[in-house]
Amino acid sequence: MLIDFHTHTSASDGELSPSALMARASSLGLGALAITDHDTLEGLKSAASHVPDNLQLVSGVELSCLWGGANIHIVGLGFDVAAPAITALIARQSAARERRALKIAQRLEQAGFSGAYDGAMSVAKGAELGRPHFAKWMVSEGLVDSETRAFDRYLGRGKPGDVKTFWPALAEVVAELVAAGGMAVLAHPLHYSMTRMKLRALCADFAEAGGRGIEISSGRQTQDEIAKLTRLAQEFGFYASVGSDFHRPWQHGPELGVPTTVARDVAGVWEVVL
Ligand code: MN
Ligand code: MN
Ligand code: MN
């Protein structure tokens, strides 16, 4: 079966509307899809009323949090959208994102880019503000020649706009997801540039907090990487999750859908949430 448990819509930094994303998933033959926008359920909620017949929609969200000074992403799956724990968690993430956006804007102002906050707001069109909106605004104003350049110089890791101090702790986010009846999945573990020892410490703390899943495939993963992550799943008793981290149709980027057969010798989260 082809599924995708990590995707974004225009409710966060994705390009497609929730219904366009589901239509694409359906036409590509996916059996199940989780919409996992950054820190918001708006895309998921608007999708819920018009799911194509042949597609199973799974509740999802991608939450930013902190662990040992690093910005970690947790994908929540299969929770009850109406649970008080998830509502409170999203409200908290939203407030943290707002404070972070103000701080990023302030840093960009200090770097000489005035009007950053209002500019990013106008680009976001009601979506939760994130660094990509600042990057788009900088390009539209001709302040940088590409979004990549905006990240390289001003918004990426170690740059003025790299603000992460406002996110809640990983253990807190995992506990709330579990309280809402969901499964917490460690997103794209190889994106954090951690040593093997540090990644294992993260997995141990994540499991201790109640985390039960780990992405073994997120976008373009090599066989080697999948094998490495599968071993990690086995070591900590995690279920394997798969997704594309799809943001937009792009010939150089991942397409929607990952075959569940990439999970060998380890149980898949889909065995629990579907
Ligand atoms: Mn994103
Ligand atoms: Mn992520
Ligand atoms: Mn993502």
Image (tube, rainbow, N blue to C red):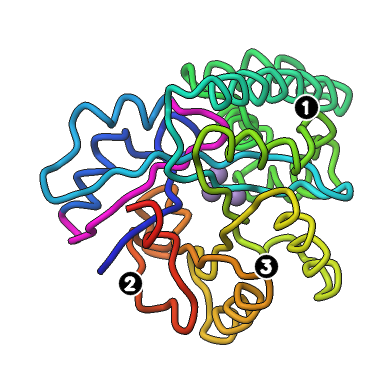
Q: Secondary structure at mark 1?
A: helix
Three-letter amino acid code at the position of disc 1: Ile
Dominant secondary structure, magenta = loop
In space, the residues marked 3 and 1 are separated at their CA atoms by: 26 Å
Name the mark on residue 228. Answer: none
In space, the residues marked 2 and 3 are separated at their CA atoms by: 20 Å
Q: Quadrant of residue 49?
A: top left
Q: Which residue is mark 2?
A: 259
Three-letter amino acid code at the position of disc 2: Pro
Q: Residue at x 46, y 42 (%)?
A: 36
- Name the quadrant where ligand 1 sits: top right
Asked whether mark 1 and ligand 1 are closer than 8 Å, the reply comes as: no
Q: Which residue is mark 1?
A: 104
Q: Which residue is mark 3?
A: 190
In space, the residues marked 1 and 2 are separated at their CA atoms by: 38 Å
Q: Secondary structure at mark 3?
A: helix
Three-letter amino acid code at the position of disc 3: Leu
Q: Is residue 253 rendered to the left or right of residue 93?
A: left
Q: Which residues are magenta?
A: 27-41
